[in-house]
Amino acid sequence: MRSLRPGPLSARFEQTFWAWAVALATGWLALAATGYRARDADSRLYAEISARMKDAPAARWIAPEFPPGWYMSGPFREHPVGLFVPAAALAALGYPAEQAAYATNAAYQVLAIVLLQRLAATLVSGFESRALAWLVQLLPIAFTFRIRANHEAAVLLCLLAALYATERARRDARFTPLILAGLVGLLLVKGLLAVFGPALCALWLLARRGASSQSNGSDRTAWLGVAAGVLAMAAAAAAYELAYRHATSEPFWSFYATRQLGVAQAAGEGSGPLAKLGNVAWYAARLLWFAFPWSVAASLGLWRWSTRAGTAAGADDSADTRAAVLFSTAAALLYLGAFSLSDRRADRYIFPAYYAVGAAGGVAALRSWPWLRTLAMRLDRAWLPAAAWSALFLAHLVAGRLGLPTIKL
Protein backbone atom coordinates (compact mmCIF):
# COMPACT_ATOMS: atom_id res chain seq x y z
CA MET A 1 0.00 0.00 0.00
CA ARG A 2 1.34 3.44 -1.01
CA SER A 3 2.40 5.63 1.89
CA LEU A 4 0.33 8.76 2.42
CA ARG A 5 3.23 10.60 3.99
CA PRO A 6 4.51 13.49 1.83
CA GLY A 7 7.87 13.02 0.15
CA PRO A 8 10.81 15.41 0.61
CA LEU A 9 9.92 17.48 -2.46
CA SER A 10 6.25 17.93 -1.53
CA ALA A 11 7.24 18.70 2.08
CA ARG A 12 9.69 21.37 0.89
CA PHE A 13 7.05 22.84 -1.42
CA GLU A 14 4.54 23.02 1.44
CA GLN A 15 7.08 24.63 3.76
CA THR A 16 8.05 27.13 1.07
CA PHE A 17 4.43 28.02 0.34
CA TRP A 18 3.55 28.69 3.96
CA ALA A 19 6.77 30.58 4.60
CA TRP A 20 6.01 32.96 1.71
CA ALA A 21 2.37 33.28 2.78
CA VAL A 22 3.40 34.27 6.31
CA ALA A 23 6.06 36.67 4.99
CA LEU A 24 3.63 38.42 2.65
CA ALA A 25 0.91 38.62 5.31
CA THR A 26 3.43 40.12 7.71
CA GLY A 27 4.44 42.70 5.13
CA TRP A 28 0.84 43.65 4.42
CA LEU A 29 0.06 44.01 8.12
CA ALA A 30 3.15 46.17 8.63
CA LEU A 31 2.25 48.45 5.72
CA ALA A 32 -1.28 48.92 7.04
CA ALA A 33 -0.17 49.44 10.65
CA THR A 34 2.46 52.05 9.83
CA GLY A 35 0.52 53.88 7.11
CA TYR A 36 3.65 53.70 4.96
CA ARG A 37 4.12 56.06 2.02
CA ALA A 38 7.16 56.02 -0.24
CA ARG A 39 9.32 59.08 -0.79
CA ASP A 40 9.65 58.87 -4.58
CA ALA A 41 7.15 60.88 -6.61
CA ASP A 42 6.05 58.10 -8.98
CA SER A 43 5.11 55.77 -6.13
CA ARG A 44 3.13 58.48 -4.37
CA LEU A 45 1.29 59.36 -7.58
CA TYR A 46 0.42 55.76 -8.45
CA ALA A 47 -0.61 54.94 -4.89
CA GLU A 48 -2.91 57.97 -4.85
CA ILE A 49 -4.44 57.10 -8.22
CA SER A 50 -5.17 53.54 -7.03
CA ALA A 51 -6.70 54.85 -3.80
CA ARG A 52 -8.96 57.28 -5.66
CA MET A 53 -10.10 54.57 -8.09
CA LYS A 54 -11.56 52.60 -5.19
CA ASP A 55 -14.34 55.15 -4.80
CA ALA A 56 -15.08 55.39 -8.53
CA PRO A 57 -17.53 53.11 -10.39
CA ALA A 58 -15.72 50.02 -11.72
CA ALA A 59 -16.71 50.99 -15.26
CA ARG A 60 -14.56 54.12 -14.88
CA TRP A 61 -11.46 52.34 -13.58
CA ILE A 62 -10.05 52.20 -17.09
CA ALA A 63 -9.92 56.00 -17.17
CA PRO A 64 -8.39 57.38 -13.95
CA GLU A 65 -7.44 61.03 -13.65
CA PHE A 66 -4.49 62.86 -12.18
CA PRO A 67 -5.12 63.72 -8.53
CA PRO A 68 -5.21 67.44 -7.73
CA GLY A 69 -1.84 69.13 -7.26
CA TRP A 70 0.26 66.96 -9.57
CA TYR A 71 2.30 68.03 -12.61
CA MET A 72 -0.65 67.44 -14.94
CA SER A 73 -4.43 67.41 -14.71
CA GLY A 74 -7.16 65.55 -16.51
CA PRO A 75 -7.10 61.94 -17.74
CA PHE A 76 -4.10 59.82 -16.79
CA ARG A 77 -2.80 58.38 -20.06
CA GLU A 78 0.90 58.04 -19.20
CA HIS A 79 0.46 54.26 -19.04
CA PRO A 80 -2.35 51.72 -19.33
CA VAL A 81 -4.30 51.08 -16.16
CA GLY A 82 -3.06 47.53 -15.51
CA LEU A 83 -0.89 48.54 -12.55
CA PHE A 84 -3.71 50.30 -10.72
CA VAL A 85 -6.60 47.83 -11.00
CA PRO A 86 -5.28 45.14 -8.58
CA ALA A 87 -4.46 47.79 -5.97
CA ALA A 88 -7.85 49.45 -6.37
CA ALA A 89 -9.55 46.05 -6.06
CA LEU A 90 -7.58 45.28 -2.88
CA ALA A 91 -8.61 48.65 -1.45
CA ALA A 92 -12.23 47.97 -2.40
CA LEU A 93 -12.01 44.76 -0.35
CA GLY A 94 -11.16 46.80 2.74
CA TYR A 95 -7.38 47.09 2.79
CA PRO A 96 -6.16 50.66 3.56
CA ALA A 97 -6.45 52.48 0.25
CA GLU A 98 -3.28 54.57 0.56
CA GLN A 99 -1.17 51.43 1.15
CA ALA A 100 -2.90 49.09 -1.31
CA ALA A 101 -0.48 49.85 -4.15
CA TYR A 102 2.51 49.05 -1.91
CA ALA A 103 0.84 45.81 -0.82
CA THR A 104 0.21 44.59 -4.36
CA ASN A 105 3.78 45.56 -5.27
CA ALA A 106 4.99 43.34 -2.42
CA ALA A 107 2.96 40.47 -3.86
CA TYR A 108 4.55 41.05 -7.28
CA GLN A 109 7.98 40.86 -5.67
CA VAL A 110 7.25 37.59 -3.92
CA LEU A 111 5.77 35.99 -7.04
CA ALA A 112 8.69 37.23 -9.15
CA ILE A 113 11.22 35.66 -6.77
CA VAL A 114 9.33 32.36 -6.85
CA LEU A 115 9.11 32.38 -10.65
CA LEU A 116 12.77 33.36 -11.02
CA GLN A 117 13.70 30.36 -8.89
CA ARG A 118 11.47 28.05 -10.94
CA LEU A 119 12.85 29.40 -14.22
CA ALA A 120 16.44 29.06 -13.02
CA ALA A 121 15.74 25.46 -11.96
CA THR A 122 15.26 24.56 -15.64
CA LEU A 123 18.91 25.45 -16.29
CA VAL A 124 20.84 24.96 -13.04
CA SER A 125 20.79 22.54 -10.12
CA GLY A 126 18.01 22.63 -7.54
CA PHE A 127 20.44 23.82 -4.89
CA GLU A 128 21.66 26.70 -7.06
CA SER A 129 18.14 27.82 -8.00
CA ARG A 130 17.07 27.75 -4.35
CA ALA A 131 20.08 29.88 -3.38
CA LEU A 132 19.17 32.42 -6.06
CA ALA A 133 15.87 33.05 -4.27
CA TRP A 134 17.76 34.89 -1.53
CA LEU A 135 20.88 35.96 -3.45
CA VAL A 136 18.88 38.21 -5.81
CA GLN A 137 17.30 39.90 -2.81
CA LEU A 138 20.75 41.30 -1.96
CA LEU A 139 21.08 43.24 -5.22
CA PRO A 140 21.33 47.01 -4.70
CA ILE A 141 18.39 47.46 -7.08
CA ALA A 142 16.30 45.23 -4.81
CA PHE A 143 17.04 47.52 -1.86
CA THR A 144 16.17 50.61 -3.91
CA PHE A 145 12.83 49.18 -5.07
CA ARG A 146 11.98 47.20 -1.93
CA ILE A 147 8.76 49.11 -1.16
CA ARG A 148 7.45 51.04 -4.13
CA ALA A 149 4.18 51.49 -5.98
CA ASN A 150 5.54 51.81 -9.51
CA HIS A 151 5.73 49.44 -12.47
CA GLU A 152 9.03 47.63 -12.14
CA ALA A 153 8.05 44.66 -9.95
CA ALA A 154 4.91 44.03 -12.02
CA VAL A 155 6.92 44.22 -15.25
CA LEU A 156 9.48 41.74 -13.93
CA LEU A 157 6.71 39.37 -12.80
CA CYS A 158 4.96 39.44 -16.19
CA LEU A 159 8.25 38.84 -18.03
CA LEU A 160 9.19 35.93 -15.79
CA ALA A 161 5.71 34.41 -16.17
CA ALA A 162 6.01 34.58 -19.97
CA LEU A 163 9.56 33.16 -19.93
CA TYR A 164 8.74 30.33 -17.53
CA ALA A 165 5.66 29.40 -19.55
CA THR A 166 7.70 29.53 -22.76
CA GLU A 167 10.21 27.08 -21.31
CA ARG A 168 7.52 24.75 -20.00
CA ALA A 169 5.57 24.94 -23.29
CA ARG A 170 8.54 23.29 -24.99
CA ARG A 171 7.31 20.07 -23.36
CA ASP A 172 3.71 20.81 -22.37
CA ALA A 173 1.32 22.88 -24.48
CA ARG A 174 -0.91 23.44 -21.44
CA PHE A 175 1.45 26.24 -20.39
CA THR A 176 0.62 28.27 -23.51
CA PRO A 177 -2.16 30.28 -21.77
CA LEU A 178 0.40 31.47 -19.22
CA ILE A 179 2.52 32.86 -22.07
CA LEU A 180 -0.51 34.83 -23.22
CA ALA A 181 -1.29 36.00 -19.69
CA GLY A 182 2.28 37.18 -19.10
CA LEU A 183 2.53 39.09 -22.38
CA VAL A 184 -0.94 40.65 -22.15
CA GLY A 185 -0.28 41.58 -18.52
CA LEU A 186 2.94 43.26 -19.60
CA LEU A 187 1.04 45.27 -22.21
CA LEU A 188 -1.61 46.39 -19.74
CA VAL A 189 1.04 47.42 -17.20
CA LYS A 190 3.72 49.04 -19.37
CA GLY A 191 2.23 49.75 -22.79
CA LEU A 192 4.75 50.16 -25.61
CA LEU A 193 7.60 48.60 -23.65
CA ALA A 194 5.70 45.30 -23.75
CA VAL A 195 7.63 44.65 -26.98
CA PHE A 196 10.45 43.38 -24.77
CA GLY A 197 8.23 40.44 -23.73
CA PRO A 198 8.06 38.57 -27.07
CA ALA A 199 11.67 39.58 -27.81
CA LEU A 200 12.92 37.99 -24.58
CA CYS A 201 10.82 34.86 -25.13
CA ALA A 202 12.36 34.54 -28.58
CA LEU A 203 15.85 35.01 -27.15
CA TRP A 204 15.12 32.31 -24.59
CA LEU A 205 14.10 29.82 -27.27
CA LEU A 206 17.11 30.70 -29.41
CA ALA A 207 19.40 30.19 -26.43
CA ARG A 208 17.72 26.85 -25.71
CA ARG A 209 18.13 25.64 -29.28
CA GLY A 210 19.81 22.24 -29.37
CA ALA A 211 18.45 21.16 -25.99
CA SER A 212 15.14 19.85 -27.31
CA SER A 213 16.33 16.26 -27.51
CA GLN A 214 17.23 16.42 -23.83
CA SER A 215 13.82 17.74 -22.82
CA ASN A 216 11.82 15.13 -24.79
CA GLY A 217 9.97 17.86 -26.59
CA SER A 218 10.03 20.34 -29.41
CA ASP A 219 10.39 24.12 -29.47
CA ARG A 220 7.65 24.35 -32.08
CA THR A 221 4.86 24.48 -29.51
CA ALA A 222 6.65 27.19 -27.56
CA TRP A 223 7.23 29.30 -30.69
CA LEU A 224 3.54 28.97 -31.55
CA GLY A 225 2.70 30.02 -28.00
CA VAL A 226 4.82 33.16 -28.30
CA ALA A 227 3.21 33.97 -31.66
CA ALA A 228 -0.22 33.47 -30.09
CA GLY A 229 0.89 35.78 -27.29
CA VAL A 230 1.70 38.53 -29.80
CA LEU A 231 -1.75 38.14 -31.35
CA ALA A 232 -3.31 38.22 -27.88
CA MET A 233 -1.44 41.46 -27.16
CA ALA A 234 -2.84 43.01 -30.34
CA ALA A 235 -6.35 41.87 -29.46
CA ALA A 236 -5.98 43.18 -25.90
CA ALA A 237 -4.78 46.55 -27.20
CA ALA A 238 -7.80 46.81 -29.48
CA ALA A 239 -10.20 45.82 -26.70
CA TYR A 240 -8.55 48.32 -24.36
CA GLU A 241 -9.04 51.09 -26.91
CA LEU A 242 -12.70 50.23 -27.35
CA ALA A 243 -13.29 50.11 -23.60
CA TYR A 244 -11.50 53.41 -23.07
CA ARG A 245 -13.48 55.12 -25.84
CA HIS A 246 -16.70 53.72 -24.40
CA ALA A 247 -15.86 55.18 -20.98
CA THR A 248 -14.51 58.55 -22.12
CA SER A 249 -15.41 59.08 -25.82
CA GLU A 250 -11.68 59.76 -26.32
CA PRO A 251 -8.80 57.66 -27.71
CA PHE A 252 -6.08 56.16 -25.55
CA TRP A 253 -3.29 54.60 -27.62
CA SER A 254 -2.79 57.50 -30.05
CA PHE A 255 -2.42 60.00 -27.20
CA TYR A 256 -0.25 57.63 -25.18
CA ALA A 257 2.09 56.81 -28.07
CA THR A 258 2.40 60.43 -29.15
CA ARG A 259 3.31 61.53 -25.64
CA GLN A 260 5.77 58.71 -24.94
CA LEU A 261 7.58 58.97 -28.26
CA GLY A 262 7.48 62.77 -28.12
CA VAL A 263 9.14 62.87 -24.71
CA ALA A 264 11.81 60.40 -25.84
CA GLN A 265 12.48 62.40 -28.99
CA ALA A 266 12.68 65.70 -27.11
CA ALA A 267 15.14 64.20 -24.66
CA GLY A 268 17.37 63.10 -27.52
CA GLU A 269 17.38 66.29 -29.61
CA GLY A 270 20.85 67.37 -30.68
CA SER A 271 22.51 64.12 -29.64
CA GLY A 272 24.97 62.27 -31.85
CA PRO A 273 26.93 59.02 -31.90
CA LEU A 274 29.16 60.14 -29.03
CA ALA A 275 26.12 60.86 -26.90
CA LYS A 276 24.77 57.38 -27.65
CA LEU A 277 28.07 55.85 -26.57
CA GLY A 278 27.79 57.92 -23.42
CA ASN A 279 24.36 56.43 -22.83
CA VAL A 280 25.79 52.93 -23.23
CA ALA A 281 28.47 53.72 -20.65
CA TRP A 282 25.88 55.24 -18.31
CA TYR A 283 23.61 52.19 -18.43
CA ALA A 284 26.58 49.79 -18.23
CA ALA A 285 27.67 51.53 -15.02
CA ARG A 286 24.14 51.18 -13.64
CA LEU A 287 24.10 47.51 -14.58
CA LEU A 288 27.44 46.94 -12.88
CA TRP A 289 26.35 48.67 -9.67
CA PHE A 290 22.70 47.72 -9.30
CA ALA A 291 23.47 44.01 -9.93
CA PHE A 292 26.60 44.10 -7.72
CA PRO A 293 28.36 41.94 -6.62
CA TRP A 294 26.88 39.29 -8.88
CA SER A 295 27.53 41.51 -11.91
CA VAL A 296 31.25 41.08 -11.23
CA ALA A 297 30.87 37.32 -10.92
CA ALA A 298 28.81 37.28 -14.13
CA SER A 299 31.48 39.24 -16.03
CA LEU A 300 34.25 36.94 -14.82
CA GLY A 301 32.15 33.88 -15.58
CA LEU A 302 31.38 35.13 -19.09
CA TRP A 303 35.07 35.77 -19.74
CA ARG A 304 36.04 32.29 -18.55
CA TRP A 305 33.26 30.68 -20.56
CA SER A 306 34.20 32.54 -23.74
CA THR A 307 37.88 31.58 -23.42
CA ARG A 308 36.90 27.91 -22.99
CA ALA A 309 34.53 27.91 -25.97
CA GLY A 310 35.79 25.59 -28.65
CA THR A 311 38.33 23.92 -26.37
CA ALA A 312 38.09 20.47 -24.87
CA ALA A 313 37.08 21.99 -21.54
CA GLY A 314 34.45 24.10 -23.23
CA ALA A 315 33.03 21.06 -24.95
CA ASP A 316 32.16 19.68 -21.52
CA ASP A 317 29.81 22.62 -20.80
CA SER A 318 26.20 21.45 -20.71
CA ALA A 319 23.56 22.79 -23.07
CA ASP A 320 21.86 24.33 -20.05
CA THR A 321 24.99 26.28 -19.07
CA ARG A 322 25.36 27.51 -22.63
CA ALA A 323 21.69 28.58 -22.69
CA ALA A 324 22.03 30.44 -19.38
CA VAL A 325 25.10 32.35 -20.54
CA LEU A 326 23.66 33.21 -23.93
CA PHE A 327 20.27 34.34 -22.62
CA SER A 328 21.51 36.48 -19.74
CA THR A 329 24.09 38.16 -22.00
CA ALA A 330 21.61 38.74 -24.82
CA ALA A 331 18.94 40.09 -22.44
CA ALA A 332 21.39 42.57 -20.89
CA LEU A 333 22.62 43.72 -24.32
CA LEU A 334 19.05 44.10 -25.57
CA TYR A 335 18.14 46.48 -22.76
CA LEU A 336 21.41 48.41 -22.91
CA GLY A 337 21.22 48.81 -26.68
CA ALA A 338 17.54 49.75 -26.83
CA PHE A 339 17.54 52.37 -24.09
CA SER A 340 20.88 53.87 -25.11
CA LEU A 341 19.23 55.09 -28.32
CA SER A 342 17.37 57.74 -26.32
CA ASP A 343 18.98 60.33 -24.07
CA ARG A 344 16.06 60.04 -21.66
CA ARG A 345 17.91 58.13 -18.95
CA ALA A 346 16.56 56.38 -15.87
CA ASP A 347 17.82 53.49 -13.73
CA ARG A 348 14.42 51.80 -13.81
CA TYR A 349 14.26 51.48 -17.60
CA ILE A 350 16.55 48.44 -17.60
CA PHE A 351 15.15 46.93 -14.40
CA PRO A 352 14.76 43.34 -15.74
CA ALA A 353 18.38 43.38 -16.96
CA TYR A 354 19.62 43.75 -13.38
CA TYR A 355 17.93 40.47 -12.49
CA ALA A 356 19.14 38.67 -15.62
CA VAL A 357 22.73 39.62 -14.80
CA GLY A 358 22.22 39.13 -11.05
CA ALA A 359 20.85 35.61 -11.49
CA ALA A 360 23.61 34.60 -13.90
CA GLY A 361 26.23 36.11 -11.62
CA GLY A 362 24.75 34.46 -8.56
CA VAL A 363 25.13 31.03 -10.13
CA ALA A 364 28.64 31.88 -11.36
CA ALA A 365 29.59 32.97 -7.83
CA LEU A 366 28.21 29.77 -6.32
CA ARG A 367 30.35 27.78 -8.73
CA SER A 368 33.51 29.90 -8.40
CA TRP A 369 33.56 31.09 -4.78
CA PRO A 370 33.84 28.09 -2.40
CA TRP A 371 33.02 30.17 0.68
CA LEU A 372 29.71 31.28 -0.86
CA ARG A 373 28.78 27.76 -1.91
CA THR A 374 29.55 26.46 1.57
CA LEU A 375 27.46 29.23 3.13
CA ALA A 376 24.57 28.60 0.73
CA MET A 377 24.63 24.88 1.51
CA ARG A 378 24.38 25.63 5.22
CA LEU A 379 21.49 28.03 4.60
CA ASP A 380 19.61 25.72 2.23
CA ARG A 381 16.30 25.72 4.04
CA ALA A 382 12.83 25.94 2.52
CA TRP A 383 11.87 28.93 4.67
CA LEU A 384 15.04 30.99 4.23
CA PRO A 385 14.15 33.06 1.09
CA ALA A 386 10.82 34.09 2.62
CA ALA A 387 12.45 34.90 5.96
CA ALA A 388 15.10 36.98 4.19
CA TRP A 389 12.44 38.86 2.24
CA SER A 390 10.41 39.54 5.37
CA ALA A 391 13.43 40.79 7.34
CA LEU A 392 14.63 43.04 4.51
CA PHE A 393 11.10 44.33 3.85
CA LEU A 394 10.53 45.24 7.50
CA ALA A 395 14.01 46.80 7.76
CA HIS A 396 13.27 48.96 4.71
CA LEU A 397 9.92 49.93 6.19
CA VAL A 398 11.61 51.09 9.40
CA ALA A 399 14.35 52.90 7.46
CA GLY A 400 11.73 54.68 5.38
CA ARG A 401 9.85 55.79 8.45
CA LEU A 402 13.10 57.12 9.97
CA GLY A 403 14.03 58.93 6.76
CA LEU A 404 17.31 57.04 6.30
CA PRO A 405 19.04 57.31 2.89
CA THR A 406 18.33 54.77 0.15
CA ILE A 407 20.85 52.94 -2.02
CA LYS A 408 21.76 54.94 -5.13
CA LEU A 409 24.71 55.25 -7.50
Image (cartoon, rainbow, N blue to C red):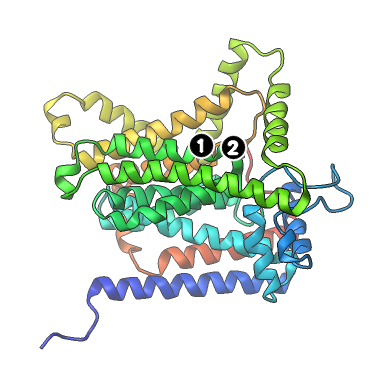
Quadrant of residue 300 within the rendered picture: top left
Residue 373 visible to the viewer: no
- The residue nearer to you, when weighing 95 against 384, is 95
- The answer to whether residue 25 is visible is yes
Q: Is residue 274 above or below residue 383?
A: above
Q: Residue at x 68, y 20 (%)?
A: 268
- The residue sitting at 25% across, 36% down in the picture is 322
Secondary element at image label 1 = helix
Residue type for callout 1: Val
Q: How many marks?
A: 2
Residue 95: name its quadrant.
bottom right
> At label 2, which amino acid type do we have?
Leu
* Residue corresponding to mark 2: 192
Q: Which mark is residue 396?
A: none
- Pointer 1 and pointer 2: residues touching (CB < 8 Å)? yes
Q: Which residue is mark 1?
A: 195
Q: Residues within 10 Å of mark 1 (few under 14, many from 20)?
A: some
- Would you say 124 lies left or right of 397 here? left
Residue 378 in percent (x, y) is at 32, 63
As measured in the structure, the alpha-carbon distance from the residue carrying label 1 to the one carrying label 2 is 6 Å
Residue 286 in percent (x, y) is at: 56, 33
Which of 232 and 148 lies nearest the eye of the viewer?
Answer: 232
Name the residue: 39% across, 70% down.
16
- 19 on left or right of 194: left
